[in-house]
Image: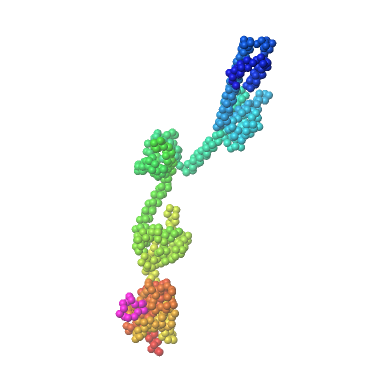
């Protein structure tokens, strides 16, 4: 109910004032109104003297003073209501402002605390009382406001350096500001503290958590020491190029490399630095820098020469990159290092020159040479002479495993190569296979060499086939003479016994696996076995002599040609072999005719799985068999 409504109500009530006690009514109504508005107004303020008014003689005119009085009272009440309302509004605004400030206080990103200094009887600071703290400060210490408010700092905070205590006490007593960085071991955190005094004996502190910054600074410091240690340990020079300002900053080691003292403690014009670069290398250096600036390369990375103070040139290895670019993508700053690699470079150049000489000797030599990786047994380099010797192209030999050439297995070859590396054995004798399939007897002189920290075997191959074959032939001739001597002095019991003995001598002479002797029965056109054999048939027919030699088996070829027939690459089984023995390997063979008076009277057939036969074998065996047949004829004459 507002003031106007109250006045209207009271005005209506005045028309019936004769029926009511006016003083009671007025007191009751106004008191109720005041209480409803929570106003503290003495009810005695509104008082009536009933004797002053004559209710019995009251007329319309007599009510005027009463109404005027009531209106006055109502005006006073309305004024009081307005005043209280305004006061409540101000209090509400103050409360809202206080809440806003409290929210702002608690929403600060830094910690904040208000403290009152505690002095002893002598006026000396001994402690402080916590008067207020925001949420950030409480959160940092995992506390609530009730845990710290109005408590002594010594009871709440365990950390605080004596130096900082003296500083904040001075701030509280004399004003001013204080600043310090404190480390809290329990939290493993660093705080930057700013203190000021809002009034005497009070101080406020702002706590800024700078842990990340401090740890980053510590990490940068460690990194700095590491980089300095690396640069010192590697003896590296450094350069810092301000491209926009066209200036360099170099360290003492860089200056030392070119024979100068660090006479430019500040920046040096880049044109001075580039004057040190050898003229023959300048174009390549400029091109590489241009490619880095164009972002074609991530790094400047190259070796080039700088002119030393003594007039000579030193080789350096320099590496760097652009660290800053402008908004248009143009380079602003480039940094890098350089190492003096003169000794290594000169050694490398000498080695390179030596390698060139070696390659010249290697590729132009008339000796068969190749280089083998002992781990894989593969050929990594070969000269033209080797390609011609083996009958392969040079490209085919590169990467070829040695077991394609050496008749030994790969494991056996690896074993021999390991002996060459570890036992210092240098000369080996092998059988090497040519592209044509022919076998060459070779001596291999192997020497370990190191290329790019990897070990290889350099091999020189000497063809020793002629010497080996000559030695073998001499040995075989001796064996043949021995065989002839054995046949001459053999006391045979019969002609068949002598033929069997001669066959055994032939098998031993040729290292064959077995052999047989066939007699030639020209009248019946049949070859008859001298003795039983589990490998061949007892008889074998003559073939039509009108057939070409290419269509005949080896026995009929020898019978018709009256010459030795050698089969080192058989394509099929022999027709005179027994069927039950045809499940094995194809046999190499040699067929030797015994010719008497221009007639073939017998055939010696020798066979082997692994060995091969040659014309030398044929010639020596023919001499042996001729001698044997003379002995047969003598035996026959005796009989």
Q: Quadrant of residue 162?
A: top right
As rendered, which of 21 and 268 lies closer to the eye? 21
User: What colouring does the structure picture have?
Assistant: rainbow
Q: In which quarter of the image is residue 499?
A: bottom left
- Residue 100 position, x and y percent, is 56, 27
Give the farthest residue toward the bottom.
Answer: 639
Q: Can residue 145 be seen in this view?
A: yes
71 is higher (above) or lower (below) than 428:
above
Label total for image = 0
As rendered, which of 336 and 628 lies closer to the eye? 336
Give the farthest residue toward the left.
Answer: 546
Is 544 included in the stretch rendered in magenta?
A: yes
Q: Which residue: 67% across, 16% down?
A: 20
- Residue 264 position, x and y percent, is 43, 34
Q: In which quarter of the image is residue 595?
A: bottom left
As rendered, which of 593 and 45 lies closer to the eye? 45
622 is higher (above) or lower (below) than 173:
below
The quadrant of the image that shows the C terminus is bottom left
Is 208 included in the stretch rendered in magenta?
A: no
The quadrant of the image that shows the N terminus is top right
175 is higher (above) or lower (below) than 395:
above
- Residue 433 position, x and y percent, is 39, 66
Q: Which residue: 59% across, 34% down?
A: 139
Q: Is residue 256 visible?
A: no
Left or right placement of residue 108 versus residue 153 in this view:
left
Residue range corresponding to the magenta coloring: 543-556
- Residue 181 position, x and y percent, is 57, 32
Q: Which residue: 66% across, 19% down?
A: 28
């Amino acid at each position: 109910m507002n003031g106007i409504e109250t006045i209207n109500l009271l005005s209506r009530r005045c028309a019936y004032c004769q029926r009511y006690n006016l003083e009671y009514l007025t007191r009751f109504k106004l008191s109720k109104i005041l209480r409803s508005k929570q106003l503290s107004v003495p009810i005695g303020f509104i008082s009536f003297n009933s004797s002053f008014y004559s209710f019995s003689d009251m007329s319309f005119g007599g009510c005027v003073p009463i109404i005027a009085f009531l209106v006055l009272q109502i005006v006073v009440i309305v004024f009081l209501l307005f005043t209280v309302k305004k006061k409540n509004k101000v209090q509400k605004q103050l409360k809202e402002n206080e809440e806003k400030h409290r929210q702002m206080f608690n929403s600060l990103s830094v910690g904040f605390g208000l403290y009152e200094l505690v002095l002893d009887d002598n006026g000396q600071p001994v402690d402080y009382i916590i008067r207020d703290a925001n949420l950030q400060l409480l959160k940092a210490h995992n506390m609530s406001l009730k845990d710290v408010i109005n408590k002594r700092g010594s009871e709440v905070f365990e950390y605080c350096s004596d130096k900082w205590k003296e500083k904040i006490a001075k701030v509280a007593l004399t004003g001013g500001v204080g600043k310090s960085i404190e480390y809290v071991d329990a939290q493993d955190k660093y705080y930057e503290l700013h203190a000021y005094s809002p009034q005497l004996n009070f101080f406020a502190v702002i706590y800024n958590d700078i842990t990340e910054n401090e740890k980053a600074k510590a990490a940068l410091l460690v990194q700095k020491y590491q980089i300095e240690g690396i640069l010192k340990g590697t003896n590296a020079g450094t350069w810092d190029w301000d491209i926009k300002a066209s200036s360099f900053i170099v360290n003492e080691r860089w200056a030392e490399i070119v024979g100068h003292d660090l006479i430019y403690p500040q920046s040096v014009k880049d044109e001075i630095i580039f004057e040190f670069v050898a003229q023959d290398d300048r174009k390549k250096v400029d091109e590489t820098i241009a490619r880095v600036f164009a972002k074609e390369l991530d790094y400047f990375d190259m070796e080039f020469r700088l002119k030393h103070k003594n007039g000579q040139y030193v080789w350096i290895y320099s590496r760097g990159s652009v660290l800053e670019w402008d908004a248009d993508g143009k380079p602003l700053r480039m940094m890098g290092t350089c190492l003096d690699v003169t000794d290594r470079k000169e050694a490398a150049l000498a080695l390179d020159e030596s390698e060139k000489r070696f390659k010249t000797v290697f590729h132009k030599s008339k000796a068969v040479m190749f280089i083998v990786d002992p781990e894989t047994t593969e050929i990594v380099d070969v000269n033209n002479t080797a390609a011609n010797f083996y009958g392969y192209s040079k490209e085919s030999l590169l990467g070829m495993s040695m077991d394609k050439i050496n008749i030994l297995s790969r494991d056996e070859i690896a074993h021999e190569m390991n002996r060459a590396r570890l036992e210092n054995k240098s000369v080996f004798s092998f059988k090497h296979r040519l592209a044509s399939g022919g076998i060459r007897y070779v001596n291999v002189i192997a020497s370990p060499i190191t290329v790019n920290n990897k070990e290889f075997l350099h091999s020189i191959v000497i063809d020793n086939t002629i010497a080996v074959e000559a030695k073998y032939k001499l040995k075989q001739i001796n064996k043949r003479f021995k065989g002839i001597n054995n046949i001459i002095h053999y006391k045979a019991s019969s002609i068949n016994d002598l033929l069997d003995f001669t066959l055994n001598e032939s098998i031993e002479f040729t290292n064959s696996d077995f052999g047989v002797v066939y007699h030639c029965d020209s009248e019946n056109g049949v070859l008859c076995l001298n003795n039983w054999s589990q490998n061949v048939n007892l008889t074998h027919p003559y073939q039509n002599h009108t057939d070409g030699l290419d269509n005949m088996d080896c026995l009929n070829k020898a019978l018709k040609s009256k010459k030795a027939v050698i089969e080192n690459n058989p394509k099929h089984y022999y027709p005179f072999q027994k069927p039950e023995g045809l499940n094995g390997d194809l046999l190499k063979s040699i067929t030797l005719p015994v010719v008497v008076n221009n007639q073939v009277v017998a055939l010696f057939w020798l066979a082997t799985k692994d060995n091969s036969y040659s014309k030398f074998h044929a010639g020596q065996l023919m001499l042996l068999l001729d001698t044997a047949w003379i002995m047969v004829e003598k035996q026959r004459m005796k009989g």
